[in-house]
Image (cartoon, grey):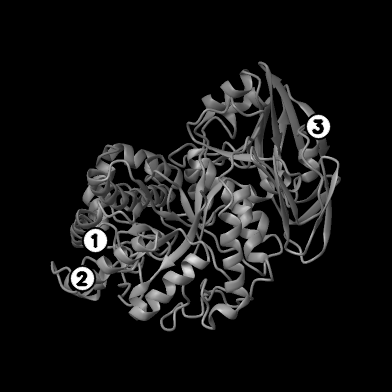
Amino acid sequence: MIIYGADYNPEQWSKDVWLEDMTLMKECKVNMVNLNIFGWALLEPSEGVYDFSMLDEMMDLLYENKISVDLATATAAQPAWLSMKYEDVLPKDKHMNTVWHGSRQTYCPNSSHYRLRAKLLVEAIVKRYHKHPALKMWHVNNEYSDHTSICYCDTCAEKFRVWLKGKYSLEEVNERWGTAFWSQRYYSFSHIIPPRHTAADPNPGLVLDYKRFMSESTYELFLMEYDIIKAYTPDMTVTSNFMGNDNKPLDYYKWAKKMDLVSWDSYPDPLDSRAYMKNALTHDLMRSYKKQAFVLMEQAPDQVNWRSKNPNKEPNEMILYSMQALAHGGKGVMFFQWRQSLKGAEKFHSGMVPHNGTETKTYREVKALGHILSSMKEDDFKASVAIYFDYDNWWALEYEPGPSADMKYMDIVRDYYAYFYDNNIPVDFVFNGETLEDYDYVLVPNAYMLHDEGVFKDYVKKGGQLIMGAFSGIVDESDTVFSKGYMSSLSDVFGIKVLGYHVLKETKSNLLGHYSWKDEVKVLTADLLFDDDVLITKNSTGHGNAYYIGGRFDDYSKVLDEIIKIKGYDSDEGVSVRVGKKYVYLLNFTGLHKSLDFEGINYKLQPYGYKIIHL
């Protein structure tokens, strides 16, 4: 069964509205709601005093109406009394200014008082509801690091020193960070502070390790809640909703190893002409973390409220994007939120039940979608291409100052991914330490930080086709430039020597397209596939081949046409073909009528329309 529903916030409504909601949810075939995401202030009105009366009533009401609950732990927004009573709770920015209470997610992840009160709250919730028949899933916190991704307070500084001591000696810190530069050498761990505001650029090794530390600090919060939940409900699914592929602060791959189910929140930009492709990439990324089906935990039924300009969705566009989730391995389609708020910062964010009720386009579409999904099941997909993804590399590459602020990791990944999306070739993502041998092709868009050399070498030796993009093999895991030269540890695999790089003053073009960067490459044993200012090389080694793309193109279609020998499905721009084991999905993300030939049959697609073919 496909999960279908939304965040439900009954605390915003009177009890007569609750009863109406039950009727409408059943009418829309809603089978699950996310409950209690922002309930802390009502559950604990003062320290250690709990009031579960409203939540008790709602859990019972949902069960009576055969609607399952994904019960949240309510720790995403602490009550005002907690923020005001304990000064370590509120985070500080890099200028050491306090980030004040008054919105959400305004807590320091290392605050002992936040951690204690969150622990006690979660224990109280889990003890009370772990046997409730409505409970089907647990929802830890909400959108970790979306608003407060980093804190620089004294508590974090002390915890950071402890974290460093657990990994390195003081001499190793000085060596890894290169503190001989700018007289930064440390003679005591007590002298090390977070990368707060400084007169010039902070040490890049310090910045990188602090990003790792903050990701792990936030992960500790998740583990604390996860362990409490599992102590009472060891067999129940636990999730926490991830953000989109531009959410940089957390290493989601490490999180997903522990998480029972990956879920994420999707809000494609309606003003971006390629939003559907970027959204598809994130679906594939989320599926790939565990190589399992994911849940689309949030999307907007119509408008959002937080961009500078918030157009409505076109007719059927919401249903189309919901089908895209299933077409990339989703097992659930949910929304923020069920009923559109009348007050607060998100009152103009759409809901499944809009301000103007059930006579609206939005409600008609969410009702129609519920009936469609009620007859569908989750699907499975097989990919022969993998894109290598690495959070450490992302963090390190985008430290500035660097060669070019235009070398953005996700932009590079997206530009390569677009080739496979446009050719309707399925893609998985793989991560540091994972096996690669299940894939015919492995593409590494950028490996500025290179620390998987052995895996890459073994893959090519056994017959794999490895493709690596420009400005790779520059630094090791401590962000130290390789002393033997760029790409030195993989020089024999690629049959080249990278002598340098060139940031072009202006974009140039050749037969392969427009490019803004080129590596200076010396060919050793490789064959030249292309040589017109930018070099594309191929080196046969073992049973496989290693390709190096020595430039940063804005479109890699002609480049990859020279390398990729997999046949996808032909379709017009904006039309996607996804072939699973149960269904074929034909998706039209344009406002035009489209026709598509698939397996000898011509299909007509309405603007923002789709077809599902049963296999």
Using the image, determine if residue 79 lies above or below residue 258: below
Crowd around label 3: few <14 · some 14–19 · many ≥20 (10 Å):
some
Q: Secondary structure at mark 2?
A: helix
Q: Earlier in the sequence, mark 2 or mark 3?
A: 2
Label 3 with label 1: CB-CB less than 8 Å: no
* Number of marks present in the image shown: 3
| Quadrant in the rendering for residue 258 | top left
Q: Nearer the viewer, residue 187 or 124?
A: 124
Label 2 with label 3: CB-CB less than 8 Å: no
Q: Nearer the viewer, residue 142 or 501?
A: 142
| Quadrant in the rendering for residue 274 | bottom right
Say what amino acid the circle numbered 3 marks. Answer: Leu
Residue 188, how many percent across, how many down?
22, 47
Asked whether, in this view, residue 555 is left or right of residue 99, the answer is right
Furthest-left residue in this view: 48
- Rounded to the nearest angstrom, the CA distance separating label 2 from label 1 is 18 Å
Provide the residue designation for mark 2: 82
Using the image, determine if residue 447 lies above or below residue 308: above
Say what amino acid the circle numbered 1 marks. Answer: Asp
- What label sits on residue 154 in the rendered view? 1
Q: Secondary structure at mark 1?
A: helix
Q: Earlier in the sequence, mark 2 or mark 1?
A: 2
Provide the residue designation for mark 3: 529
| Quadrant in the rendering for residue 67 | bottom left
Q: Nearer the viewer, residue 584 or 437?
A: 584
Residue under the point 49% across and 42% down: 289
Q: Specify the quadrant that holds the C terminus.
A: top right
Residue under the point 64% across and 40% down: 582
Say what amino acid the circle numbered 2 marks. Answer: Leu
Residue 186, how many percent across, how many down?
28, 47
Q: Nearer the viewer, residue 304 or 126?
A: 126
